[in-house]
Image: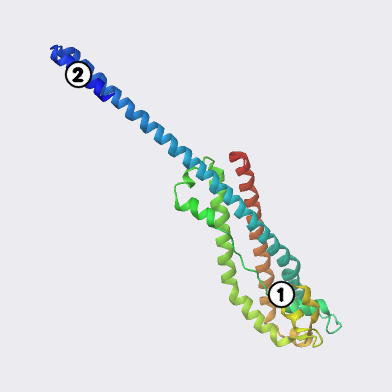
């Protein structure tokens, strides 16, 4: 092809047809420019196609991360609401009560042990980090989807920080309550049953507690009240995280058929 164009130029010069040669040269330049532009366009199209495919893959991974997070947060929510919050509310009410109770009540004994527990707040961030650390995040067309993704991980960070700030109060209350109860293990239970702490061995534990001394320690009242609030605040944060996760999944399905 190059030899063909060279022969044409040579023929025009030999025939002294300067004007035709110039027109031909300009036309040849235009063809070269068009060829370059087409090549660039094809290359850009290929790169765009690759980026869209990569974005689709990362968003699919994000959906999987959210699914795993959702399972974990659901478990945290259930145990915090039904066990840890319930335990702290029982202790708070019992502390201000004057009703005579049967000593060694199993529910109250369990409440002493679990009132101050706050499960870890954690999440999987591999896909999110890939989105943020590249230009893929900016390629998401839906502003609402981008806002919800950022809000989701921001809320997790907030709840983590909130929980860390609450640790001193939780730990101090654990120490304070330890003066009023003692955990007893059934010595006839095999060691393997006790060491396998999955909840199934919970029946091997019992609690002796000093209800009179517990009620007389008035310094516990505001601490128990704060503990109840901490559990409720964490549950509220987990509800926000759950709602954001559901909205993100719905938008991924709508925008990217994921």
- Looking at the picture, the colour scheme in use is rainbow
| Left or right, residue 6 beside residue 130 | left
Q: Could you say where residue 56 lies in the image, as x and y percent from the top left?
A: 54, 44
**Residue in the image at 70% along x and 78% along y:** 221
Label number found at residue 148: none
The quarter of the picture where residue 207 lies is bottom right
State which quadrant residue 44 falls in.
top left
Question: Compared to 49, does 118 lie above or below?
Answer: below
Identified at 47% across, 42% down, the residue is 51
Q: Is residue 234 above or below residue 240?
A: below
Query: Considering only order in the chain, which callout, 1 or 2, is on the residue closer to the N terminus?
Result: 2
Gap in Å between the C-alphas at discs 2 and 1? Answer: 93 Å
Q: Which residue is label 2 attached to?
A: 9
User: For the point 57% across and 51% down, which residue is it?
Assistant: 62
Q: Where is residue 22 in the image (x, y as percent from the top left)?
A: 19, 17
Instruction: Provide residue 90's location: percent of width, then percent of height.
Output: 77, 74
Query: Mark 2, mark 1: which one is toward the viewer?
Result: 2
Residue at (71, 75) in percent of width and height: 115
Q: In this view, does 145 lie above or below 41?
A: below
Give the crowd class for mark 1: few <14, some 14-19, many >=20 residues within 10 Å: many
Does residue 243 appear to the left or right of 41 in the view shown?
A: right
Q: Residues within 10 Å of mark 2 (few under 14, many from 20)?
A: some
Q: As rendered, which of 22 and 63 lies closer to the eye?
A: 22
Label at residue 115: 1
**Element marked by disc 1:** loop
Which quadrant of the rendered structure holds the N terminus?
A: top left
Screen quadrant of the C terminus: top right
Instruction: Say if 82 sits above or below 250 in the image.
Output: below
Relative image position of residue 84 (x, y in whole percent):
72, 70
Q: What kind of element bears circle 2?
A: helix
User: In terms of depth relative to the viewer, which is nearer, 19 or 215?
Assistant: 19
């Amino acid at each position: 092809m190059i030899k063909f164009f060279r022969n044409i130029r040579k023929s025009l010069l030999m025939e002294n047809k300067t004007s035709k040669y110039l027109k031909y040269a300009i036309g040849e330049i235009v063809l070269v420019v068009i060829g370059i532009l087409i090549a660039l366009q094809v290359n850009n199209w290929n790169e765009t196609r690759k980026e869209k495919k990569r974005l689709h893959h990362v968003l699919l991974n994000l959906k999987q991360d959210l699914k795993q997070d959702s399972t974990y947060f659901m478990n945290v929510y259930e145990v915090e609401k039904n066990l840890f919050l319930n335990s702290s509310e029982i202790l708070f009410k019992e502390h201000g009560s004057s009703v005579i109770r049967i000593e060694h009540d199993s529910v109250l004994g369990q409440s002493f042990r679990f009132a101050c527990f706050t499960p870890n707040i954690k999440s999987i961030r591999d896909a999110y980090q890939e989105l943020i650390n590249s230009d893929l995040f900016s390629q998401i067309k839906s502003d609402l989807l981008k806002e919800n993704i950022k809000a989701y991980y921001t809320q997790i960070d907030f709840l983590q920080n909130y929980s860390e700030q609450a640790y001193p109060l939780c730990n101090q209350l654990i120490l304070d309550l330890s003066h009023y109860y003692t955990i007893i293990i059934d010595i006839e239970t095999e060691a393997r049953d006790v060491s396998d702490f999955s909840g199934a061995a919970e029946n091997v534990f019992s609690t002796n507690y000093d209800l009179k001394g517990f009620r007389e320690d008035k310094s516990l009242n505001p601490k128990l009240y704060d503990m109840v609030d901490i559990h409720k605040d964490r549950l509220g944060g987990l509800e926000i995280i759950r709602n954001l996760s559901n909205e993100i999944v719905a938008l991924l399905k709508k925008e990217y058929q994921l």
